[in-house]
Structures are given as structure tokens and as C-alpha cells.
Amino acid sequence: MVTVDEVRALARTLPRTSEHLIHDRIKFRVGAIVYVAFSRDERSMGFGYPKEQRDGLIAAEPALFFLPRPSDLRFNWVCCHLERLDHAQMTELVCEAWRMVVPKFLARQRLGG
């Protein structure tokens, strides 16, 4: 199981990231763009993810991943249950969500590729 503190520790290493408490929810963003957010009860995490790939992600692991609420379907966003998420998956998901919101040169400097 992954905790908010583990995600926070990773997010703090990602350049330009800031943490905010908005409507009792912890969110990590770059500028005004949120790339990771937790539910109020901190049992689930939403993260940036390409819309065209999210159905495949959810179909591959439906016990772990789920769609955001209907009003958020227009965004590049997927959610997951923290109790089912392992540390390696969290690292990949958070880093890739961050990569989506920063300039390409910065993502290459930090993550390569």
C-alpha cells in the first residue's frame, strides 16, 4: 500500500512541483496544472494520464484503476485505490503525470528519454 507521505516524498523531488490543500484535498501541481490529487479520505489518488489510453489501463487492472467522476472525464485523468498500489507503480504514475505538465526539456533532464 502506498501512502500520501510516500507520494509527497517523490513529488518534492520533481522540479517546479508545489503542494496545495484545496477543498480539504492534497494536490500536487506545476504552475496551475494539477498532476496528482488525493481524495478527502486519502484512500484514492487521481493522476494525469492520456485520455486515449485510460480505458486500456483500467481494463488491464480494474481492481486498481477507475475513471474519475463524470464531470472530470474531459480531463486527462485516471484514479486508483492506494491500498492496491505498489511503490513501483506509484513512482511510474506520478513521474509520468508530472512529465505531462512540464516542458519537455525539464522532463528529459529529470527522467531521461
Image (cartoon, grey):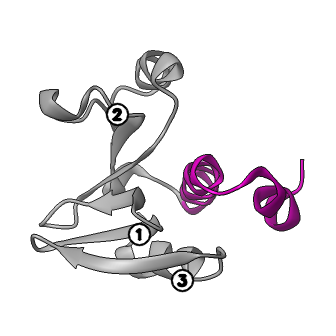
Q: Which element type, helix, strand or loop, lies under badge 3?
A: helix
Instruction: Give amino acid for label 3.
Output: Ala
Residue tagged 2: 75
**Residue 18 position in % (x across, y down):** 46, 79
- Indicate which disc residue 28 carries: 1
Q: In the visual, does 54 lie left or right of 16?
A: left
Q: Total marks drawn?
A: 3
- Please rate how many residues cluster around mark 1, counting C-alpha atoms within 10 Å: few if below 14, some from 14 to 19, many from 20: many
* Apparent side of residue 13 relative to residue 73 in the rendered image (left or right): right
Give SS at disc 2.
loop
Q: Position of residue 30 (x, y in %)?
A: 50, 66
Under tag 1, what secondary structure? strand
Mark 1 touches mark 2? (CB < 8 Å): no
- Side of 76 relative to 109 (left or right): left
Numbered badge on residue 9: 3
Query: Gap in Å between the C-alphas at discs 1 and 2?
Result: 16 Å
Type of amino acid at the residue the image marks with label 2: Phe
Quadrant for the N terminus in the image: bottom left
Residue contact at pointers 2 and 3, CB within 8 angstroms: no
Q: Where residue 29 appears, x then y in whole percent?
A: 44, 66
